[in-house]
Image (cartoon, rainbow, N blue to C red):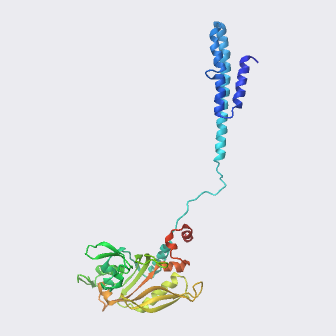
Amino acid sequence: MNELDALAQSAREAFAAAATPADLENAKAQYIGKSGRITELMKGLSALPVDEKKTRGAQINVAKQAIEAALTARRQALADAELELQLKAEALDVTLPGRQRGQGSLHPVSLTQERIEAVFGSMGFDVAEGPEIESDWFSFTSLNSPPNHPARSMQDTFYVEGKGADGISLNLRPHTSPMQVRYVHAHVRKHGNGFDPRSGDLFGGDMPEVRVIAPGRTYRVDSDATHSPMFHQCEGLWVGENVSFKDLKVVFTNFCRTFFESEDLVLRFRPSFFPFTEPSAEIDIQFQSGAMAGRWLEVAGSGQVHPNVIRNMGLDPERYIGFAFGMGMDRFTMLRYGVNDLRLFFDGDVRFLSQFK
């Protein structure tokens, strides 16, 4: 083995011993760097005769090419090794289940509202929605609550700064009962046979019965362990020429038994007082089996619509009669799903909400 072959072999061994790209570059400098051994040999050609210079230069170039080939091969080997380590570190185990984004669901109170709408829809009731910022007239006066009624107190009702277009003060509706009057007004104007209670304008023609429920958010200045200043309520109304208290009992009994899927559910109508109905009754229910068996639970208020409210709806109370009821959807939700703490509906705890998917 001549001198140049030995030099090339030495370079291969040095490159093979380099464990990192930095070590490899240091080894390269010893052989083909600016001060490397091949470079020094090339500089020494100037002292040789012309004929010998040509032969010696060709031999040095062959050694240089061999060294450069070994350098390129080692660079590629180190790059391949680094890539292999990276692939192992970032390896994907295809046998593991994929990560899926969690699927959301409706809030339990929303599920209850959908169920209420479906049950009453099967009995021919429309669903009405209205403003949550309501006129004092629709919230109280139209419902037979005079200006000195205690429900108008700041302790019971949230008022809004400013007044409506008609100059009447505004509030966050304390119940969805205003939608009864609003809906019948629209119904009367569409079908006739009524009058505007404030202007006195008359409308002629026959009017079909009104059957409607009004679910939605309501607000009262009431916040303790069992109440929230914002809650959900559903009002119901059936007005016609021959609607009696008996119809109220049949409709609400059928609704409760369908909603709770229990035919042995017992209802009790307990005499009470509400300014917008006369006679009035609290509605209690009793389950005959399960954890709540034997207990009477108040779930709604009801009664035949007061003649003054019928009149404020734009109808003749001598001809039209009806019944109304109001129930808390939060309470119905708690009873249906066995929830024992109202605050769970507002905490936003995914562990609680995920149970209703």
Residue 324 in percent (x, y) is at: 39, 86
Q: Measured from the top left, where is residue 50 in percent x and y?
A: 63, 7
Q: Residue at x 43, y 86 (%)?
A: 301
Q: Tell me residue 267's x, y (percent).
A: 50, 89
Can you say whether 345 is above or below 77 in the image? below
The quadrant holding residue 126 is: bottom left
Instruction: Examine the image and state in which quarter residue 168 appears.
Output: bottom left
Looking at the image, residue 94 sits to the left or right of residue 295; the answer is: right
Q: How many marks?
A: 0
Q: Is residue 323 above or below residue 73?
A: below
Which residue is depicted at the point 67% across and 12% down?
56
From the image, which quarter does the C terminus lie in? bottom right
Measured along the vertical axis of the image, is residue 91 above or below residue 40? below
Considering the image in quadrants, where does the N terminus appear? top right
Q: Is residue 325 left or right of residue 90?
A: left
Residue closer to the observer: 252 or 63: 63
Coordinates of residue 287 in the picture (x, y in percent): 55, 87
User: Quick check: 155 left or right of 103?
Assistant: left
Q: Residue at x 46, y 76 (%)?
A: 113
Q: Of residues 140 and 286, which is closer to you in this image?
A: 140
